[in-house]
Image (tube, rainbow, N blue to C red):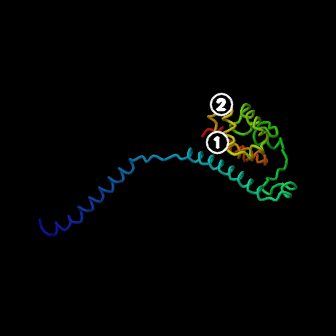
Amino acid sequence: MNFEDFDIWLWIIPILVGIFAGILGYLIGKGKNVPSVDYSSDINALEVQNAKLKADLEICTKRLNISKTPKKQADSAPAISEPITLGFDKDVAKKALGKKVKEDDLKIVEGIGPKIEGLFHNFEIKTWKALSETSTDKCQEVLNSGGDRYRIHDPASWPMQAKMAYEGQWKELAKWQDKHKSGKF
């Protein structure tokens, strides 16, 4: 073997090793199935928790505004943070939700049926406005008053849904309820 043949092999061997390593790396990489992680249930749980926190924050803000309002003004004028309602329109509600809706029917809130509505009525919570101003802890207290069979319910989003109904945000309420599939994620 002469010196010129040796010089060619110094070029050929690294090229062949590089080509072989490239093909082998491609085949190994292509064969791996990287599982995708589905975070949709976590996102839905966080949305419910966010709704609960927003409802609690609004209640605290209203309490703070009421405590800062002078007595004369509090008696004569509504609180500034009160939402403005345009009145209940049963046709708009029916169109958005796809069913008849009676004013202040708590059963339109996802998760509330006739018996749970009765429990809320026992606590003098009979309107969407009253439910929208109720804390999640108070909702849980109402459920607990019915016994163990009501412990499976999660009232975290109930004040938020009631607020949407009270303010006439029927499309938003229907969209939220459809997204959360009857309270099940």
124 left or right, relative to 33: right
Query: Which residue is pictured at 82% across the width and 53% down the height?
Result: 84
81 and 46: which one is in front?
81
Find residue 1 and report its image quarter: bottom left
Per the image, label 1 sits on a secondary structure element best described as: loop
For the residues marked 1 and 2, what is the alpha-carbon distance in whole angstroms? 26 Å
Q: Earlier in the sequence, mark 1 or mark 2?
A: 2
Question: Can you tell which quarter of the image residue 183 is in?
Answer: top right
Label pair 1/2, CB-CB below 8 angstroms: no
The residue where tag 2 is placed is 147
Viewer-nearest of discs 1 and 2? 2
Locate the C terminus by quadrant. Answer: top right
Residue at the spot of label 1: 180
Q: Position of residue 4 (x, y in %)?
A: 16, 69
Name above or below for residue 70 compared with residue 166. below
Q: Residue at the location (30% across, 58% down)? A: 19
Q: Nearer the viewer, residue 91 or 159?
A: 159
